[in-house]
Every structure is written in C-alpha cells, then in structure tokens.
C-alpha cells in the first residue's frame, strides 16, 4: 500500500535499547524496520494484510524509554492509522 509505505517510510532510522523477540515470520509480511543484533537484521516493525483486515506489528516498547522516543510514537500512531484505515 503506497500510503503505508510513505507513512512508515518517512520515519528516519533511530536507536533505542529494548528487548528483541525472534519469530518465525510469514512470507507475506512487509518488513518496515529492523534491529541490528550483532550484524544480523531482525525485523521489529512489519505489516501485512489478512483477509479484509490489516496487521501492524511493533516490537519496540517493552521499556518506557522506548515508548517515549519520538520515532516509536510516530510508528505506533501511523501504524494504528493504517490498520484502522484512517478512522481513528
């Protein structure tokens, strides 16, 4: 979705210290942000469509400092807007 790419793609790279969760990822996800884990890229923000719905997974936020970071706030806000199709 072009609007989604513009929204999440407009957020600059940033750094936070937080927990990483490792998943078996589906083939139909679109990775939006990755974390560097010792040279290995780990997806931490991804989106996908499922049936008539939308999913936006955001990993950063296990520490309150992460939730206060402007980039994480922007990702949560734009991800929610995309999931709700702008009806928030």
Image (cartoon, rainbow, N blue to C red):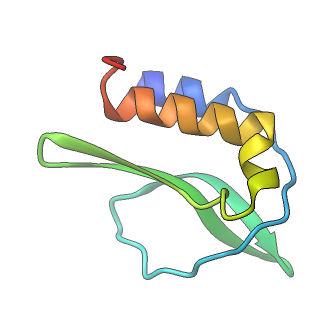
Tell me which residue sits at (57%, 25%) in the image: 7
Q: Which quadrant holds residue 54? A: top left
Q: Residue furthest top?
A: 87
Please determine whether, in this image, residue 18 is positioned above or below residue 13: below
In the image, 6 versus 73, the foreground residue is: 73
Specify the quadrant that holds the C terminus.
Answer: top left
Please determine whether, in this image, residue 29 is positioned above or below residue 84: below
Q: Position of residue 46 (x, y in %)?
A: 50, 54
Q: Which quadrant holds residue 73? A: top right
Please determine whether, in this image, residue 17 is positioned above or below residue 65: below
Q: Residue furthest left?
A: 51
Tell me which residue sits at (42%, 74%) in the image: 25
Please determine whether, in this image, residue 76 is positioned above or below residue 84: below
Tell me which residue sits at (68%, 26%) in the image: 10
Residue 25 visible, this angle? yes
Q: Is residue 54 left or right of residue 16?
A: left
Q: Is residue 87 left or right of residue 17?
A: left
Q: Is residue 38 left or right of residue 6?
A: right
Residue 1 visible, this angle? no
In the image, 51 versus 1, the foreground residue is: 51
Q: How many marks?
A: 0
Q: Position of residue 22 (x, y in %)?
A: 56, 81
Q: Position of residue 11 (x, y in %)?
A: 72, 32
Q: Position of residue 43 (x, y in %)?
A: 60, 65
Specify the quadrant that holds the N terminus.
Answer: top left
């Amino acid at each position: 979705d072009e609007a989604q790419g513009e929204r999440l793609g407009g957020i600059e790279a940033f750094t936070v210290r937080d927990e990483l969760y490792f998943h078996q990822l589906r083939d139909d996800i679109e990775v939006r942000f990755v974390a560097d884990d010792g040279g290995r890229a780990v997806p931490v923000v991804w989106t996908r469509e499922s049936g008539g719905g939308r999913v936006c997974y955001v990993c950063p936020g296990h520490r309150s400092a992460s939730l206060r970071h402007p980039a994480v706030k922007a990702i949560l806000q734009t991800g929610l807007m995309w999931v709700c199709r702008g009806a928030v």
